[in-house]
Amino acid sequence: MIYLDYSATTPVRPEVLDSFVRSCQDFIGNANSIHRLGIESHHIIDKATEQIANILNVKPTEIIYTSGSTESNNLIIKGIANKYKNRGNHIITTPLEHSSVYGPLNYLQQQGFEVDFVKLDENGLVDIEHLKTLIKDTTILVSIVAVNSEIGLRQPIEEIGKVLKEYPRCFFHVDMTQSVGKIDIDISNVDLATFSPHKFYGLKGIGILIKKENIELEPLIHGGKSTTIYRSGTPALPLIVSSAKALRLATENLNENYQHVLRLREYLITELKKEKDVIINSNDYCIPHIVNISVPKIKPETFVYALEEYKIFISTQSACSSGESISKAVYAITKDEEIASSSLRISISNFTTKEEIKEFLKYFIICKKQLKLEKK
């Protein structure tokens, strides 16, 4: 099997799974209980939270645990809107966001909120000058993804954060789901951030939300004590502990891992460019972990199923956007419906080998020839 869909989810590292199992067995008490077992569980969660905070260079009190990035994005967008609606009803975002950002934004529009989309330059990067013109007295939130999940575009988050610091009544949210564990981003000028450990070899079912001090959120879930007042529910100790382990392992050799993926990307793109009917959608501003391509006149779903016959797994769009006829992100960059409706996403990791890429290329070319013959 050759797995090239790491941006959808990653396999769990054995060390992380072991941490989860041991936590389940060794700390059975509810962290909210006042007896000894509860106190022990609470202490373990505090240690894990401190470890996560140190890695991310934030305070432990600024971390909120959720069920995943989707809940985290909903909590931030709806939570800010509901808490600060007396201040304004205007939100700014981009055409490159995940569906878990567009979903709550669409909901808020139905409630009377105003949403504007900032323009992108020729490379797909946020036009910062246009962003400045969109900000007004009623703007309460700017939500910009750090790395787009379909083509891998990395936005200049640090630069945008510095600009937005000049507007203290407007909060800056960054969806970091595709960046944490892959690249290093300075979030000192970011107010709110979200990510999920299952994107860097952790377990599914937990998300991490960073909320800087002095910012309030209206909770989505009410009732019951937890690690914070912003998200009720029994603290998921094993998921929290294993997430700290996954984050530590993912960031230990960040640069070395990045260089490995970069070499694979360069080889992959070099070989794909030899195929005249293949269009490379990812550009030099994309992280190397995601390579988006299009093969016009072949349905991407058909290509995915053809490769699956050889036990090779890639995807069409973001897993949460599958089923849509066109890639919004690819269209936002190319402005070409045919290219956007035939896009494929190949996502690699530091565990991917060059041999796997070679094998993928071999069967990719075989499948492409077969599918083109069937079209005739």
Image (cartoon, rainbow, N blue to C red):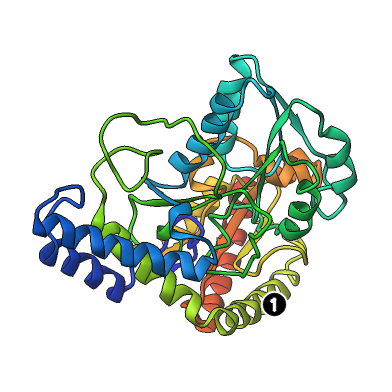
Give the residue drawn at x 73%, y 41%.
168
Q: From the viewer's perspective, is residue 33 above or below residue 87?
A: below
Q: Nearer the viewer, residue 299 or 29?
A: 29
Q: From the viewer's perspective, is residue 345 above or below residue 67?
A: below
Locate residue 214 relative to residue 159 in the image: left or right: left
Q: From the viewer's perspective, is residue 309 above or below residue 174?
A: below
**Position of residue 174 measured from the top left corner of the image (x, y, whole percent):** 62, 49
| Residue 179 quadrant | bottom right
Locate residue 346 relative to residue 41 in the image: left or right: right
Q: From where the camera sits, is residue 226 visible?
A: yes
Q: From where the camera sits, is residue 281 visible?
A: no
On the rendered image, what quadrant is the N terminus found in? bottom left
- Mark 1 lies on a secondary structure that is helix
Q: Nearer the viewer, residue 225 or 321?
A: 225
Q: From the viewer's perspective, is residue 46 above or below residue 305?
A: below
**Position of residue 359 measured from the top left corner of the image (x, y, whole percent):** 51, 76
The residue that label 1 is drawn on is 266
Q: Nearer the viewer, residue 125 or 376?
A: 125
Q: Nearer the viewer, residue 221 or 50?
A: 50
Give the residue drawn at x 56%, y 69%.
182
Give the residue drawn at x 72%, y 36%.
169
| Residue 111 quadrant | top right
**Label 1 packing within 10 angstroms: few (<14), some (14-19), many (20+):** few
**Position of residue 118 measured from the top left corner of the image (x, y, whole percent):** 79, 38
**Position of residue 294 measured from the top left corner of the image (x, y, whole percent):** 69, 53
- Give, as a three-letter code, the residue at label 1: Glu
